[in-house]
Amino acid sequence: MTDKTTIRVFIADDHAIVREGLKQILAEQRDIVVAGEAENGLDAIKLFRKSRCHVMLLDISMPDRNGIEVLKQIKQERPELAVLMLSMHREDQYAIRALKAGAAGYLTKQSAPRELVTAIRQVAGGQKYVSATLAQALASQVGLDHDAPPHDSLSDREFQTLTMIASGKTVSEIARELSLSVKTVSEYRARLLAKMNLKTSAELTHYAIRNQLVD
């Protein structure tokens, strides 16, 4: 991209009010246009191909597919596309996982109004975008020789299931929210408990709280 190129942005978020808010912010910028939008992961994968976008704003928690799963598929198709993850979760819960999966940056929805435009311009220019808080967290890990915590071994869907259980949701509630069967969520729960050498949801919740994986 050159300095004179208009940045084309695709927005994928299941909340209409969030999409409208983002569009209002971007409408005030001369060098940024919204090239398309989607309300779920499957639509995001289908529709972004037609948008010729330079940057995608991708919600990490959508009802049909986990945002990181969507990110991985999109990066397979267009490795050069800058994907900026949006999340209601704190940075320490998902940001590093998203960056490892290929995201160009990570914004919490609370910080988006003040950081959004800067982040879009930065990732459109081929750079990464992280907040000062996250940059400090990443820097503090450099050179440390320690074992990875057990939750690092989880798949993206297993990690999402962990945080939802630790937030007090039942298997049925998780299945409904993620549009999955109760059996599938139960399998995720069983797998993550086995990987983490835990036996009950209560132990899992204590682990998540101790490691600040839930608010």
Image: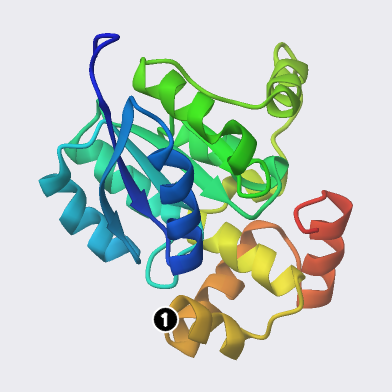
Residue 191: % across, % down: 56, 67
Q: Which one is nearer the viewer's eye here, 48 or 113?
A: 113
In the shown orientation, is residue 57 left or right of residue 203?
left
Residue 67: % across, % down: 43, 54
Mark 1, residue position: 179
Query: Who's the residue at 75% across and 27% down the image?
Result: 133
Q: Type of residue at label 1?
A: Ser
Answer above or below: position of 54 versus 94: above
Q: Which one is nearer the viewer's eye here, 19 or 84?
A: 19
In the shown orientation, is residue 161 left or right of residue 41?
right
In the shown orientation, is residue 157 left or right of residue 64?
right
Query: Who's the residue at 41% across and 49% down the image?
Result: 23
Query: Who's the residue at 49% across and 66% down the image?
Result: 17
Residue 176: % across, % down: 50, 86
Residue 52: % across, % down: 15, 37
Answer above or below: position of 129 versus 16: above
Would residue 200 be seen by someone viewing this image from the given angle?
no
Within 10 Å of disc 1 (Cα), the crowding (few <14, some 14-19, many 20+) is some
- Judged from this view, the residue extending furthest toward the left is 50
Q: Which quadrant does the N terminus fall into?
A: top left
Query: Who's the residue at 51% across and 40% down the image?
Result: 98
Would residue 154 be seen by someone viewing this image from the given angle?
yes
> For numbered disc 1, what is the local secondary structure?
loop
Q: In which quadrant of the rendered view does residue 38 lie?
A: bottom left
